Image (cartoon, grey):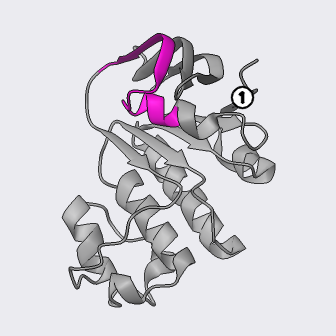
Amino acid sequence: MAALLEATGLVAGYARPVAGPLDLALEPGEVVGLAGPNGAGKSTLLRSLAGEPLVHGGSIRRAGGELALLPQKPPRPAEVPLTAREYLGLTGASPLASMATWLDRRVDALSGGQFQLLAAQARLGAGAAVVLLDEPTNNLDPAAAEGVAEAIDLAAAAGRGVVVVSHEAAFLARTCHRTREVAPWS
């Protein structure tokens, strides 16, 4: 089976390298976690995998298909009065059962945790071949975090490849087939 996303010796950073080298091959239906201490460069590596110009060395190869990125703080549509249901509809993602009580609320009226879950499902359920999630359980209570885990499970079952950055070891153990430890550049 061909990898959906492959990084070989990936070194990423800004003015100077901050993380790497990372070797990673993401197969269809696979969920890979990136773990490590604060400041190790996990988010920088993830953003490099998404195509941002942060690569200092190595290579990234994508097999094709769409790629979706959930940043640590996903932007809310402030000017457009969308409900959560309409927001998901724009992406083609289906709602999760745990969203039923607030699907018809406007996005700008959702709590931080509700919006985080909505934004995660919008990326995971939209059909992109590769989904990159940066701290998807930020601001989430345990039930909402489990909702994100279920959405990841569904995406993997549909053949999508998912990379998850998280500080939460239990969440990574619950959702990932394997986890890579990221150490700061030295």
User: Is residue 133 found left or right of 159 in the rendered image?
Assistant: right
User: Is residue 107 found left or right of 183 in the rendered image?
Assistant: left
Q: Name the one closer to the observer, 103 or 17.
A: 17
Instruction: Report crowding for label 1: few under 14, some 14 to 19, many 20 or more residues within 10 A (C-alpha).
Output: many
Please report the residue visible at 63 percent of the width from the left and 71 percent of the height from the top. 139
Up-down relation of residue 10 to residue 113 (above or below): above
Locate the N terminus by quadrant: top left
What secondary structure is found at the residue carrying circle 1? loop
Q: Does residue 62 show up magenta in the picture?
A: yes
Q: Name the one closer to the observer, 134 or 170.
A: 134
Q: Amino acid at mark 1?
A: Val
Provide residue 89's location: percent of width, then percent of height.
22, 69
Please report the residue visible at 47 percent of the width from the left and 52 percent of the height from the top. 71
Provide residue 155's location: percent of width, then percent of height.
44, 47
Please report the residue visible at 72 percent of the width from the left and 28 percent of the height from the top. 182
User: Is residue 171 found left or right of 136 in the rendered image?
Assistant: right
Q: Does residue 182 show up magenta in the picture?
A: no
Provide residue 67's location: percent of width, then percent of height.
33, 38
Up-down relation of residue 88 to residue 162 (above or below): below
Across the whole image, how many numbered discs are drawn on residues?
Answer: 1
Locate the C terminus by quadrant: top right
Up-down relation of residue 167 to residue 21 (above or below): below
Provide residue 25's location: percent of width, then percent of height.
52, 18
Please report the residue visible at 47 percent of the width from the left and 36 percent of the height from the top. 47
Query: Residue 165: which quarter of the image?
Result: top right
Query: Residue 88: which quarter of the image?
Result: bottom left
The magenta span reads 46-63
User: Is residue 11 found left or right of 110 in the rendered image?
Assistant: right
Q: Which residue is mark 1?
A: 182
